[in-house]
Amino acid sequence: MYRERLVATEARSESARRLQQLLLDYHDFRQLKAAHPLLDTTFLVAEWQAQRLKATHSDLYQHPGYHHGLEFLLTDLYAPAGMTRRDDNIDRVFPKMVKWLPDNLLDTFAGLVELNLITQQLDLELTELFHKQGIAADSLSTEHYCAAYRASERLDQRKKQITLVSEVGHQLDHYVRNRTLGWLLSMSRTPAEMADLTDLHSFLHRGYSAFRKMEDVNLLINRLVTREQQVMRNILSGHPEPFSLPGDL
């Protein structure tokens, strides 16, 4: 919807150009996915993976100091459905973002967009592999999932996905420690509503609140990354219980 605005905006820094290209890539992918015959199935695949992540990291998910942060990661950052208006809003305000935001914030936004894009591309690839193999997404098993995972042609992207979780998580933690951001989000609520940017503002406020409530963001992010790297090694090596991890992870 706002692709022309993205293309027409002059991006004067490397960070702005990176965000611009990622938003264009994500915009085009969203159009492709919306018209894909397996669109509804991708939501089932994403939900299966979200439940797997909650089970793998159940100790963190159930911990009051990390629950809100992990819930935000799984429902807002990893959320292929219901975020169309938020994503359109980001495209719409891109000209103001590159005008007013510093490069370090543009880099963080770029990381968030890239993480979302890669995650949804990987979900779509898995969905197509399941369909090709005649596997119903509403009856997925660990064996089905791991077989399709190993058949993926995007293993480098899976490694990049984990790296981005680490990078973006640490960057977000840095920003939410600044109380000025919380004040700005509170003050900008009404202007956001007047500008029809409620979805985007709500997303930012949820992220700020979730990370502010966490006891130790570095601990959460580091454990998530270490565990998911081990899960990946388990799957690729054919481990019989790929999601069962050692007690010290």
Image (cartoon, rainbow, N blue to C red):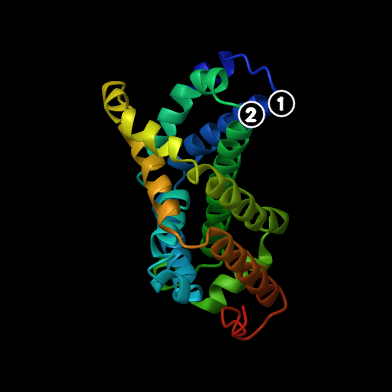
For label 1, the residue is 14
Q: Is residue 103 above or below residue 146?
A: above
Image location of residue 219, percent across then percent down: 57, 65
Amino acid at circle 1: Glu
Q: Is residue 35 visible?
A: no
Q: Secondary structure at mark 1?
A: helix
Q: Secondary structure at mark 2?
A: helix
Question: Local crowd at mark 1 within 10 Å, few (<14), some, or many (≥20)?
Answer: few
| Front residue of this view, candidates 60 and 77 | 60
Q: Is residue 225 left or right of residue 209?
A: right
From the image, state whether disc 1 or disc 2 is nearer to you: 2
Amino acid at circle 2: Asp
Gap in Å between the C-alphas at discs 1 and 2? 8 Å
Labels in figure, total: 2
Residue in view at x 68 percent, y 53 percent:
160
Q: Quadrant of the C terminus?
A: bottom right
Image location of residue 130, percent across then percent down: 53, 64
Q: Is residue 177 left or right of residue 103?
A: left
Image location of residue 93, percent across then percent down: 45, 23
Residue in view at x 37 percent, y 46 percent:
206
Q: Is residue 17 above or below residue 29?
A: above
Q: Are marks 1 and 2 in contact (CB under 8 Å)?
A: yes
Residue 103's tag is 2
Image location of residue 211, percent across then percent down: 45, 53
Q: Is residue 122 left or right of residue 89?
A: right
